[in-house]
Every structure is written in structure tokens, then in C-alpha cells.
Image (cartoon, grey):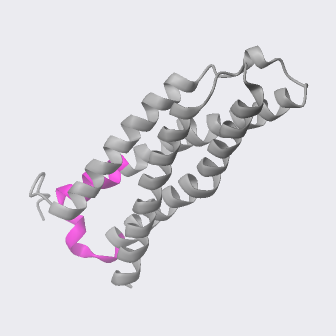
Amino acid sequence: MRRLLKFLHTMGSAGLLGAMAALVVLVSLAPAPAALPGYAAIRGAMGAVATWIFLPSLAVTLMSGLLAMALNRAYLNAGWAWIKLATGVLMFEGGLVYVQGPMKREAEQSARALAGLLDPAALARSLEGERGTLWVLLAVATANVALGIWRPRILRIPR
């Protein structure tokens, strides 16, 4: 069971970091909404990455980490594991509220604008915020990977 959880946690982390890197690239390549067909295509791709790679990877990473903590007593006394738990929960909340939700919504709105059902002026209001959020989440995820690899002796929890 330990190896399975470690495998799931590692694969989830790889998918999560890859999805965020892909989203950073797509945000950087997004044309202005005036070029509506290209903008809608990029936003559709971003919505798909957020829904089908980012969110499942985030869920697998968080759930496998929680299960590993519950099943391995050594993690309960390790401060680094608790820091990973806290930042993992923040990643999940930030991922849902600031990444997956807005990207999916913008993809739907750009598709509606392309179909002539929405004014294109209502698009691209969140690109800079999304870019900043992705960079912050990438930094936190990288810090979590570093904590899991080096397991520093910080915040040793007394028995």
C-alpha cells in the first residue's frame, strides 16, 4: 500500500506541475480577444487542461498524501509532512477557486462569444491574475516536492 500511495503521489505531482507549466505557456500565448478564433481556441485548451489534467492530478496528489499520512505513523510526527498537508490544502482551494473555475468559465464565455452570443469585450479580464496565480501555485508545488525529497527536520512534533 505504501508503494502504491507513493506512486500515486508522485504521478499526481508530475501531472500537477506539468499542467501548471502548460497553463503558464498557454496564458503567455493567448492572443487578444480581438483575434477571437485564436483566443477561443487557446481558452478552450486551457479549460480542458484545467479540467482534465490539473484538477484530477491535484485531487490524486492530495488524497494520496492524506492517506499516506494516515497509514504511516512516522509522518504524524514530521513537521515537513504537516507543512506539505497545509500547503496541499491551500493548493487545492487555490486550484479550484483561482485556476480551474475561472479557466473553465472563460473557455465557455469565449466559445459563446465566438458563436455571437456574448460581446468579446467581456473577455480576457482575468489573464494577468491567472498568470500570477499559476506562478504562485507552481512555486508552492515545487516547495512541496522539495519538502518531500529532502524531508528537513523542521517543526518536530513532540510525542
The magenta region covers 70-87
Question: What residue sits 15% from the left and 61% below the top?
Answer: 150
Q: Is residue 27 left or right of residue 149?
A: right
Residue 79 to residue 41: above or below: below
Q: Is residue 78 magenta?
A: yes
Tell which of 7 and 32 is nearer to you: 32
Question: What residue sits 75% from the left and 14% below the top?
Answer: 121
Task: From the top left corner, tell me how far across and down residue 144 is, in percent.
Answer: 29, 53
Tell which of 149 and 124 is nearer to you: 124
Question: What residue sits 24% from the left and 66% below the top?
Answer: 76
Q: Is residue 72 magenta?
A: yes
Task: From the top left corner, tell me how far across and down residue 62 is, in percent.
Answer: 44, 60
Task: From the top left corner, tell me how far across and down residue 1 is, in percent.
Answer: 39, 85
Question: What residue sits 41% from the left and 61% below the top?
Answer: 14
Residue 72 to residue 129: above or below: below
Magenta span dominant secondary structure: helix
